[in-house]
Image (cartoon, helix red, strand yellow):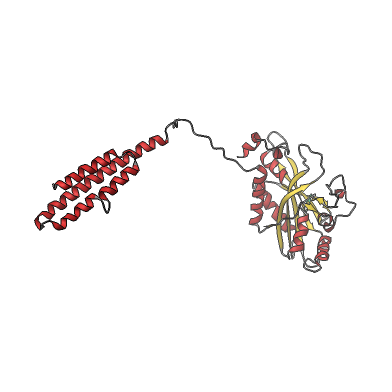
Amino acid sequence: MNSDLAEIQTAALAAIESAPDGQSLEQAKIDFLGKKGRLTAASGLMKTLPKEEKPAFGQSLNLVRGAITAALEEKGAALQEVADREAIAGIDVTLPGREIHSGGLHPLTRIKDDAIQILRRMGFALAEGPEIEDEFHCFDALNTPADHPARNEKDTFYFDSGKLLRTHTSSVQVRTMENQSPPVRIIAPGSAYRRDEIDATHLSVFNQLEGLYVAENVSLADLKGTLVYFFQELFGPDTELQFRPHFFPFTEPSFEIDIKLHIAGRAPKWIEVAGCGIVDPAVFSAISKSRGDEAFSPDKVTGFAFGMGLDRLAMIKWGIKDIRLLIENDTRFLKQFA
Ligand code: PHE
């Protein structure tokens, strides 16, 4: 082998071997294999050689390049290993990992999401309204006379301004009809407030889901079909329902819906889950007056409405005995739904 080349190889291997870190190794690579490196310069000699010596020189050149490249790779890997070991020095990789706690949805959120999903499949769109309401939207437009007990100070939270915390989500019926034209098919989940004594089945803030369908020729059969389907989707196809005649100022006829609850070891019990009925023409008259047009004229449209308590539905679905558990945020309770 050409003695120059042999000398370059020896020098290169020595520089590589003694490189203390990645940076010096990179420098060694530049010094020997780089554009202006020693081996590159030596390969320029090829031009000056007689033809018959060229192949042997070329071969030597390749051998030297190969040897230097291999040494660079080997040293690089060795330096990396040291660096890796230093990076985790003092870390005990045998320690158990940290547990990742995953959260879950609150039962009220779950029942609300389920209810919305079922009703959206039937074409109901989401609507909303304010929780601080006025008497017109909460009562007057809903055909509820001034002396109705629900309007009593004892039952309703009033502000000094005369506004109030809505006692039901039915106010959203009014707000929707003021702003949309028939056909209207909406649901409105949201909070409602009553001055109830707090106990195992009552809170002063609770959650309702309102529904309203207004179009031409909406009938009681439509109401019944919709709600039977809804509750059987929510609680299972064997769920039994009964529509019990009732009174609400804003629907006529009106019903309360009970579902039959089966608890092991006890006689089945009917339990009330919703109020509903055919929208009272007096409501359409109030809306027409408020809008100043005939879009909701009681001569043209009919409709049905319903309202249900989401807290109660969650309690039925999961056998929760005390409504207060739904607001206490005790993780021992909530964990069961995660
Ligand atoms: N707003 C009624 C309540 O809170 C429920 C209801 C809604 C009844 C719609 C009929 C129609 O009890």
Q: How many marks?
A: 0
x and y, in percent, of residue 162 in the image: 86, 52
Provide residue 132's location: percent of width, then percent of height: 78, 52
In the image, 210: left or right of 282? Answer: left
Residue 186 seen from this side = yes
332 shown above or below 27: above
Q: Residue at x 78, y 46 (%)?
A: 193
Q: Residue at x 34, y 44 (%)?
A: 23
Which residue: 17% across, 55% down?
Answer: 45
Q: Quadrant of the C terminus?
A: top right
Q: Quadrant of residue 186?
A: bottom right
Seen as rendered, the residue at the extreme right is 147
Q: Quadrant of residue 296?
A: bottom right
Query: Which of 177 and 247 lies nearest the eye of the viewer?
Result: 177
Q: Is residue 238 visible?
A: no
The x, y position of residue 130, in whole percent, is 75, 54
Residue 224 pos. (x, y %): 72, 54
- Picture layout, residue 329 above or below residue 249: above
